[in-house]
Amino acid sequence: MKLVKPGRNLMNHLNYPQKFALISSLFALPIILLTYLLFSEFQSKVDFTQKELYGTQYLRPLRRLLENTLKANIENDRTKDTNKISNQIIESKSKIALDVNKLKQLDQKFGNNLGTTSLLKNIQYASDQLDNQVNLNSQSASTNYHQLLYQLEDLWLQVGDQSNLILDPDLDTYYLMDAVLLSLPEIQRNLAEIQMISEKESAQKVISPLAQAQLITLKDKLKQLNTHLSGKMTIALNNNPSGNLRPILLRQLQQLNRTVEHLTKQMNTLSRDRGSLQAKTYSDLSAKSLQQSFILWDKTVQELDFLLEKRIDGFAHKQYWTTVFILIVLAIAAYLFICFYHGMMQVVQSLKTASQRMVDGNFKDAVTLLSQDELADVVKSFNTVADVLREAEAKYRGIFENSVEGIFQTTPNGTYLIANPMLAKIYGYNTAEDLINNMTNIGEQLYVDRDRRTEFAQLIEHHGKVSGFESQIYCKDGSIIWISESARAIYDDQKDITGYEGTVEDITRRKHAEAEVMQLTQQLQDENLRMGAELNVTRRLQKMLMPAEAELEAIIGLDIAGFMEPAAEVGGDYYDVIQHDGKVSISIGDVTGHGLESGMVMIMAQMAVRTLLVNGEMNSAKFLNSVNRALYENTKRMRSLKNMSLALLEYKAGDLYLTGQHEELIVVRRDGQLEHIDTLDLGFPLALEADISSFIAEVKVHLYSGDIAVLYTDGISEAMNTQNSQYGLEKMYEVLKQYRDRSAQEIRQAVIADLMQHIGKQKVFDDITLLIMKQK
């Protein structure tokens, strides 16, 4: 009442016109605010979509610039008919200049909204570099084209981010955006790369290993991109309420998909036979696919514009009809409000007139009110009080009898005064009267724990009430259930407790469910402990399989020190040193990822290497291919996508024979000179292909006294610090040169110490492995 009093005093000081004016103003303010917010929301959606249209307008010349740049780059890479190519390049460069000028015009209009001005300047600079190029077919021209493509990609992504295209809320336009902004440009760049490499290799009867690896990689990536494009565009077509996409885009999409699929199938033979290069076929199919992709891009962006413009029109129609609806509702509300005001003033005037007649002594005429509202009910209220009370009592009785909870009233000494049918049902009695007559001592007869009644009474005595008091009780048939009681004390005029009243709920099912949850939780904890123990056993097994210090010290001719630290409980890095039949075999590998699955692949590799060595396999190509086949079959059985790099070294009398693809072998000569032995062409990642024998080669390195050979995994070079800066190789080179006169163990300690200082408090994300070999 204190909260209402100030408002009531204010209203009492105002007449009815003032009251209506005040209330009308208070109602009008939030309505005006909500209307403003509604129309602001409409406008924000229109602005959002309009900005998407800015983005598509900007992307059109950007697409043409991408097409002309890719074509010019392909023509520049050709080696035949130099004069003809130069003329074509000149024509392409003219088109590039025109596209850049068109972008500059658009940037003046949209640059501030899209934040593209600085990136466009980079493109302008790259275009100027091409214009100033003297030799049109030089290597530097190719570099400039690639630089222009990089700048184009940055500007492309900037337009997508800043124009809201990447945030489009509708399925059809979102996946059209995905195709225009991401999928199709990536496919186009891959197709251009395939065309350039195919034309370059067309003169060779056998493709080079590097070109083969590049084409296989591009083929796999193109296949994934084609599948991704088809899937996303299908979603857009299937979720297009306007129905405009399928008739226009489906046929063009299918043509592109079929051409790309034909190209990738033709390229599948590359992984089996290096002599199967069909350069002319690859070039023609990639050129055809490239042209089809640009046609699909143009049609897709055209339909995207149509949908965006239709969305803006839809918002405009919503604004119009919302405005009409609000104006009609406000007109009706104003009309009814005015009518209500006049009716109220008429009633007030009638009461005023009647009261004045009474003041004048005229009691004959009764007050007659024509309205049927609360003021008319005042006259009748005195005659209906008894009826209202009788109705209220009947309603209360209905609630009491039909409640879904038990309702009770008891004395302090434990007898029931009142109980409803639901309470009798919970306790197993037929009627409430049966319960009241038979339950004469609640503490002794009801509770399983007889002290619960005392605790119940003490809680109410201290707090005046109790809520959620849970206990086990006996039913009439002797069965035990759980109940929850909520009650309050009943006081007399002297504030003494005369009884308790409250409700009872049967919570037996909940208690049983809680017990089951606790049991399941305990089982889950036990399972987690078991899995943790298994991971610990695997980690210990990996440590046990690493060469011991005593084994390394027994190596003749070499001072060897190794280090391996996994990033997870179980690592994916591997190294081993084995002295067998007068030779020393050294191996190091890195399984993709880390954790239990990577650790298992690492153990399989270690066992395969040792088994082959024990069985006397000396041919490096057969040796490495046998390890690869074992891992390939096992990972296939495991349905695992893991693969690994593996380098094998055989040491004999100062000579190192290196085979297998891994990180480079670093050789630090006694005078501090560094040599880097690249292993890219010495092998192929294991477990990707069943047969890699055609990729395997061998290189020989001689170590003189005091020379050092170093093997490592990318966990060292790619280690990050808290500033997200990689450790790299230059730092390790400096440490190796600085400590080259020390023992292998001291060199290892120096490198690891410098690495850990770089990492600091940053989390280690990859396994770290280092192997130092120093010629005695």
Image (cartoon, helix red, strand yellow):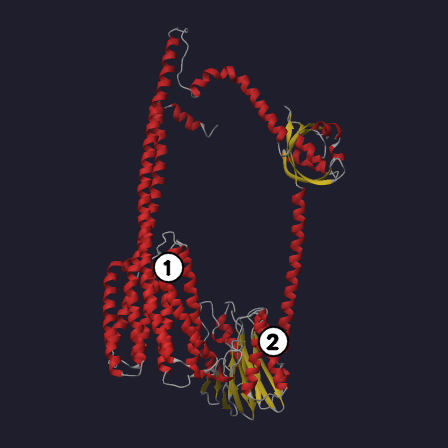
Q: Position of residue 329 (x, y in %)?
A: 34, 34
Along the horizontal axis of the image, is 711 left or right of 364? right
Quadrant of the drawing holding the C terminus? bottom right
Q: Quick check: 127 left or right of 212?
A: left
Q: Is residue 554 above or below residue 42?
A: below
Q: Position of residue 455 (x, y in %)?
A: 70, 37
In which quadrant of the rendered view does residue 504 lie?
top right
Determine if residue 303 is in view: yes
Q: Earlier in the sequence, mark 2 or mark 1?
A: 1
Viewer-proximal residue among 158 and 362: 158
Determine crowd level at label 1: few under 14, some 14-19, many 20+ residues with C-alpha closer than 10 A.
Answer: many
Q: At which x and y percent is residue 473?
A: 72, 38
Residue under the point 25% across and 77% down: 88
x, y percentage for residue 229? 41, 64
Q: Which residue is under mark 1?
A: 176
Residue for badge 2: 603
